[in-house]
Amino acid sequence: MFKKFFIPRLIQYFTVLFIGITLVFVIPRLLPSDPVATQLQRMTAQGQYLDPAAVEELRESLEELYGLKGGMLQQYLSYWKRLFSGDLGPSFTQFPTPVISLIKMSLPWTVGLLLASLSISWIIGTILGGVKVSFPNSLVARAMELVAMGMRPIPYYIMALVLLILLSFIFPIFPMAGGYSVGSKVGLNMRFIKDLLRHAFLPILSMVVLEIGGWFLQMRNVASNLVEEDYVVYAEASGLPKSKIVFRYIMRNAIIPQITGLGLNIGFIFGGALITEIVFSYPGMGTLLYSAILAGDYNLIMGINIFSIVGVSTAMLIIDLLYPLLDPRVRYQ
Amino acid sequence: MSILSVENLKAHYVTEKRRKITRVLAVDGVTFHINKNEIYGIAGESGCGKSTLLKAMSGLIKPPLQVLEGEVKYHFDDRELDILALRGEKERREIRGARISHIPQGSMSVLNPVRRIRKSFEDIVGTHLGIRGGSEFEELVKSHIEALGLDWNVMHSFPHQLSGGMRQRITIALATILKPDVIFADEPTTALDVVVQRGVVQLIKKIKQEQQNTMVIVTHDLAIHANLCDRLAIMYAGRIVEEANVDDMFQTPKHPYTEMLLNSLPTLGDRSVRESAPGAPPSLVNPPSGCRFHPRCPKVMEKCRLEVPELIEVESGHQVACFLQEGRVYEQTRELGANYH
Ligand SMILES: Nc1ncnc2c1ncn2[C@@H]1O[C@H](COP(=O)(O)OP(=O)(O)O)[C@@H](O)[C@H]1O
Ligand SMILES: [Mg+2]
């Protein structure tokens, strides 16, 4: 199994990482704009007087910082060298803070938001989908289906905006922005945790509400096919009670494609989390990326891209590796 | 003494698509009795309604399948019941698996792919006997599967780790663990290779001998019927056209369709390629009028297109639904008709 299952996945993982990170290197270099020139322009536009010698010196140090020194190959090699030593260069808007430490600060917020919303929506959506298939004609099941289909096309930012306006502007129950109240003491105490949860509530809710529908519909599709499977029909013909058939036969088998779906959608959901963060000014990677784009902070944008690629592919790899635990056909080939 | 009697059973598949209702007359007026301890065979080309008949007989009715008329009565030693009239799903469930059980088609994967074989046995034994694991469970299952020549170790396997033949043996063990009164086998040997087929037939014989159950074997393979069955019914387009002892059926077939089926059978030592039954089975959505076999029948008469022949007893225990068999009766009706005009 190791050879057949793990090796191809590991190869795939490293290939994706290599290509993704290389693209992050190539794409900015294909753009017509020159970040060094832009930066210099910005400095002179701010009214600073710089004599030409100083400008030349500045250009050189900027090129050094951006990794734009030397030929392409040389740049590419030093790009990888710096990556491996965890150096993504300094941020320009918050000079000289290294990009890596900015990312380190916002990463936990994004991971928390993602994990919470993903697990809640996946579990609830999966269970509801199973219920729908087991009692297809009940009123509740049909209502759920309608709601889920109606919600599916709503984009993340619309849902986030609606909840924000409704539950923190019109009815100010939840805070408008941020990850915790300004001036609160950070620490592991009830008060701070409560404050954290209050701030996280709306971002998580807006993602959960949107994603439950997707998991629900996927589960419904998978499980309604499973109902026709020989082993489910046979379980019915053997007089097994409905509860056993639903949990041990239908749901147990439907979990496998649900997990595949998790792997396939994680990238999309990650994107949704970034956008949701921006709407709620949540202090994660999304908000960081947004400000980096507004400020034209190249190093920061590149750093966030690299982290996103690594993060999403690693999550997919982990989900893939869960697979054999659930499917004995993979485990014992 | 009959253990199961089916009276005028009509079971149709009714589907609706864009306001258009389609009705497949899969079982359309079937009457027969099955005696206690016999092996009763049902034969016929694929698509003639054999599986549907079995479903209706075990009360597995769910959309799009509907039972329009008829009854399926079981006469167990301790109780009588019409399985189609049972109200609660719970009552039906108690009977299924315990009093009646199924041996499915050889190609089917009726074992849950993500659970070990043992779990399938636990589910059935636990549901019907209330024995949940433990030594009592192990003794019960072990003695049963070892009597059938299976090794206890297969219990720890997953279905995909076993060969098709082994899976079918396990399914048979599963279907017979509770010593059911009636066993339905739907194409139990189809899709298995010849050697495995022989093993499965032997296994079915063995179980019958030990448990003294009544069996209903459905297959299009007449060789299996010849080998296993006591009595045989031939189905055509949702109806039974002939029923007799297996020997009588093979020696003196009376319905032209039966003759056609038997002619398509290879005989020992005959190397010529046999033609399969010419023509195609009719659609069950718009079946032919009168006798449903008339478009393919080499001996078709005018009457066959208009009237439906009844299943009548022409010799002791030999019933046929064909106007050729009621020659005398036919002449009389014609005279009667002539007098009318
Ligand atoms: N679920 C279904 N919906 C509609 N028609 C069906 C369904 N299952 C079977 N049929 C039709 O009913 C007829 C009888 O099928 P079946 O009982 O499976 O025949 P057999 O077992 O003799 O091959 C066929 O014409 C088949 O197409
Ligand atoms: Mg069939």
Image (cartoon, grey):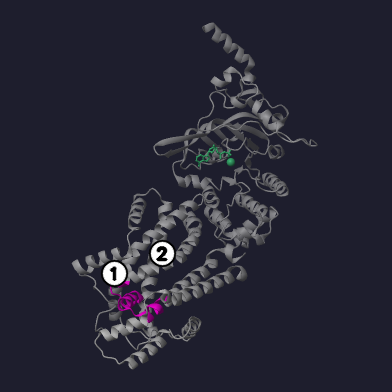
Can residue B297 be seen at all in this image of the molecule? yes
Asked if B235 appears above or below B206 in the picture, the reply is above
Front in this rendered view, residue A145 or A157:
A157
> Where is residue A28 shown, x and y percent of the image?
41, 76
Q: Residue at x 34, y 58 (%)?
A: A153
How far apart are the alpha carbons under marks 2 and 1? Answer: 19 Å
Q: Give the residues in magenta.
A: A277-305
Q: Tell me the chain of label 1.
A: A
Contact between marks 2 and 1 (CB within 8 A): the answer is: no
Kindly state the secondary structure of the residue where label 2 is placed.
helix
- Residue count near mark 1 (Cα–Cα under 10 Å), binned few <14, some 14–19, many ≥20: many
Q: Is residue A300 highlighted in magenta? A: yes
Say the numbered circle drawn on residue A123.
2
Q: Nearer the viewer, mark 2 or mark 1?
A: 1
Horizontal side of residue A86 vs B114, given as left or right: left
Q: Quadrant of residue B254?
A: top right
Callout 1 amino acid: Leu
